[in-house]
Amino acid sequence: MKTVLIAALMLLFTAQIGCAQDRKARIDNSEEIADRIVESKIPVFVDFWASWCGACRMLEPVVADLHKEYKGRVEFIRVDVDVHKAITAYFGVTAMPTVFIVEDKTARVSLRGLRNKQDYRNEIDKVLAMVKERAAASAGD
C-alpha cells in the first residue's frame, strides 16, 4: 500500500493546469486535497471520478448515502480527475471510478471500478475496526 508522505505531496502538488489565454483556466489545487487527506484525524474515502464517466455518475448517490451513514467517522472527498491531475497521478489512477480509503497517511484500501454499496461498507468497516483496535491497544499501554 502507498504511504502518503507529506513532503512528497507538497512537492508534487504545485502544478497548475489551464492556459494563459483561457480566462476560465482551472487551477489544480491538489495540494489542498492532499492536505485534507494527510491532516485528517479520521479515515478518508477518496473518490476519483470524471463528469464524462457513466459509472462515476452511478456511484455518486452511493457515496452520498455512505457519507450520511458514516458522518463524523469517515471524511469523504471527491476528486475530479480532469481538474486534479497531480493527485490523480500520485495515486496512479488509470480507471474511473477508483476509490481509496486512506487512514493514518496510508492508503489502506483501493477499489477500482463500480462496486455495490455493501462492498464499500465492508471496506470502510474494516478500516474503522483497525482504527478502533489500534486505539484500544494504545489505551492499554
Image (cartoon, rainbow, N blue to C red):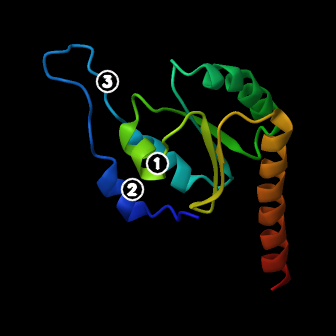
**What residue is pinned by disc 3?**
26
Q: Nearer the viewer, residue 14 or 36?
A: 14
Q: To which residue does mark 2 refer?
A: 9
Identify the residue shown where x is 64% and y is 24%.
Answer: 55
Crowding at dot 2, Cα within 10 Å, few <14 / some 14-19 / many 20+, comes out as some
Q: Can residue 31 be seen at all in this image of the molecule? A: no
Contact between labelled residues 3 and 1, with CB atoms less than 8 Å apart: no
Looking at the image, is 2 positioned above or below residue 66?
below
Give the distance between the C-alpha atoms of the residues marked 3 and 2, in whole angstroms.
20 Å
Q: Which residue is mark 1?
A: 34
**In-image side of 36 versus 16 (left or right):** right
* Residue 39 placement: quadrant: bottom right
Q: Quadrant of residue 60?
A: top right
Chain-order first, disc 2 or disc 1: 2
- Most extreme residue toward the top is 23
Please name whichever residue, 122 or 66, is drawn nearer the observer in this view of the structure: 122
- Near mark 3 (Cα within 10 A), the count class, few <14, some 14-19 or many ≥20, is some
User: What x and y, as percent, mark residue 98?
Assistant: 60, 40
